[in-house]
Amino acid sequence: MVLNCPVAGEAARLKPNGLGEARAGKARVIYQGVYHRDRGLEELILSAEWYDSAELYLRGYGELEPALHALVRTKRLDDRVHFLAPAHHAYLVESLAGFDIGVVPYRPTTMDHRLCLPNKVFEYLQAGLALAVSALPELQRLVTATATGEVFDPDSPRDIARAINALTCDAGRLAALKARALTAGRSLTWEAQGEPILTACYQELAGSAPAGRMGDR
């Protein structure tokens, strides 16, 4: 199996542009991606009401953006939920510098969502972010294997908040999870995962092909 890992990137070791300093005692939680339906973004926003020591940032674009802004205003969560302009696709890992937790709140409304393992989860790890993800088979398997975070029920804003609070209530544990994520991220790249496996597969197929038949269609 070849994991859907992106090409290796290096998180910038600089203060994140345009964000300023984090408010005292507040961890930065980020969702980075397209604003599609059934990605649990509404539930994620609602969960911010119960955060003990975190703020939520959404960086992306998509059809739901006006509705998400309206939800934040309606629920008076402007001081807890912040929207950022999309990052260039070549700098998705670098753009995560300065954040603490990467979140994937997808809901299991389709088979594609239930079994997904999106690029963003590997980008979060490469950037050294702890993970807070939906309790879906592949996402939960990854978090368990890497021991880098918490899982939650994506249909429950309160349970999303529980997972976020579990990650942020102990600064020492969060720092350890982030360090573990960075280590895991180095091995979950295209260079480390996909390229060697596919190259070996191609070499095996080429070596077993009958002589003179390699160019046949």
Image: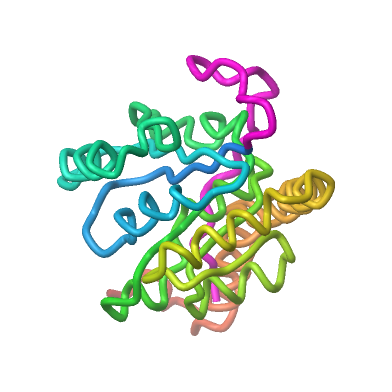
Above or below for 174 versus 215: above
Residue 150: image location, x then y, percent: 63, 65
Q: Quadrant of the C terminus?
A: bottom left
- The answer to whether residue 68 is left or right of residue 167 is left
Residue 27, image quadrant? top right
Can you give x and y, in whole percent of width and height, for residue 47 in the image?
A: 43, 55
Please report the residue visible at 52 percent of the width from the left and 75 percent of the height from the top: 138
Name the residue rendered at 42%, 30% in the picture: 79
- Front-lying residue, 133 or 155: 155
Q: Pick the quarter of the image with the N terminus.
A: bottom right
Residue 100, percent across and down? 64, 41
Camera-nearest residue between 189 and 200: 189
- Position above or below: 16 against 202: above
Of helix, strand and loop, which mostly describes the magenta segment?
Answer: loop
Q: Is residue 8 magenta?
A: yes
Q: Range of the magenta residues?
A: 1-26
Q: Nearer the viewer, residue 164 or 148?
A: 164
Tell me: 181 left or right of 7.
right
Q: Along the line of sight, which residue is nearer the eye, 14 or 135?
A: 135
Check the image and report above or below for 94 versus 213.
above
Here the colouring is: rainbow
Q: Residue at x 67, y 59 (%)?
A: 166
Determine the residue positioned at 52% across, 63% down. Answer: 133
**Where is residue 68 shown, x and y percent of the image?**
24, 44
